Image (cartoon, grey):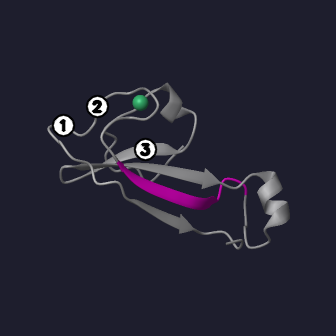
């Protein structure tokens, strides 16, 4: 599924169904979610080259897994809501 996972800190059924992974950065935990190209995306966006290509990545700081509820950020009282969004497709 993923070939760039360095440190898997959590995995559950929901996470196994999509390109989702959690990453620790100091005391912060980030949810990373990829949207990958489908056949339909390839037909609509000629900048895309192959099925499964990463189109968008969203990185959100979290304290819990939003799918199964497991606490991930140990001992952290405050999570500052923030996100990063990267769009690799031709359509913006
Ligand atoms: Zn989970």
Q: Earlier in the sequence, mark 3 or mark 2?
A: 3
Q: Label 2 near label 1: C-beta < 8 Å?
A: yes
* Segment colored magenta: 51-61
Q: Disc 2 marks which residue?
A: 71
Answer with left or right where residue 61 lies relative to residue 55: left
Position of residue 69 measured from the top left corner of the image (x, y, whole percent): 38, 27
Position of residue 27 measured from the top left corner of the image (x, y, whole percent): 18, 49
Residue 89 magenta-highlighted: no
Position of residue 17 measured from the top left corner of the image (x, y, whole percent): 57, 33
Answer with left or right where residue 7 lies relative to residue 42: left
- Disc 1 crowd rating (10 Å Cα; few below 14, some 14-19, many 20+) is few
Answer with left or right where residue 92 lies relative to residue 58: right
Instruction: Work out whether residue 19 or residue 49 is closer to the camera in this orientation and state it.
Output: 19
- Disc 2 crowd rating (10 Å Cα; few below 14, some 14-19, many 20+) is few
Q: Disc 3 marks which residue?
A: 21
Q: Residue at x 66, y 69 (%)?
A: 89
Q: Disc 1 marks which residue?
A: 74
Q: Quadrant of the N terminus?
A: top right
Q: Label 2 near label 3: C-beta < 8 Å?
A: no
Residue 60 magenta-highlighted: yes
């Amino acid at each position: 599924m993923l070939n760039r996972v360095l440190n898997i800190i959590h995995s559950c059924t929901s996470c196994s169904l999509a390109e989702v992974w959690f990453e620790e950065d100091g005391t912060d935990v980030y949810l990373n979610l990829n949207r990958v190209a489908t056949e339909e995306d390839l037909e609509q966006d000629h900048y895309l080259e192959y099925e499964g290509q990463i189109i968008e990545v969203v990185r959100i700081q979290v304290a819990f897994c939003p799918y199964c509820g497991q606490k991930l950020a140990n001992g952290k009282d405050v999570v500052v809501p923030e996100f990063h969004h990267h769009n690799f497709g031709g359509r913006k």
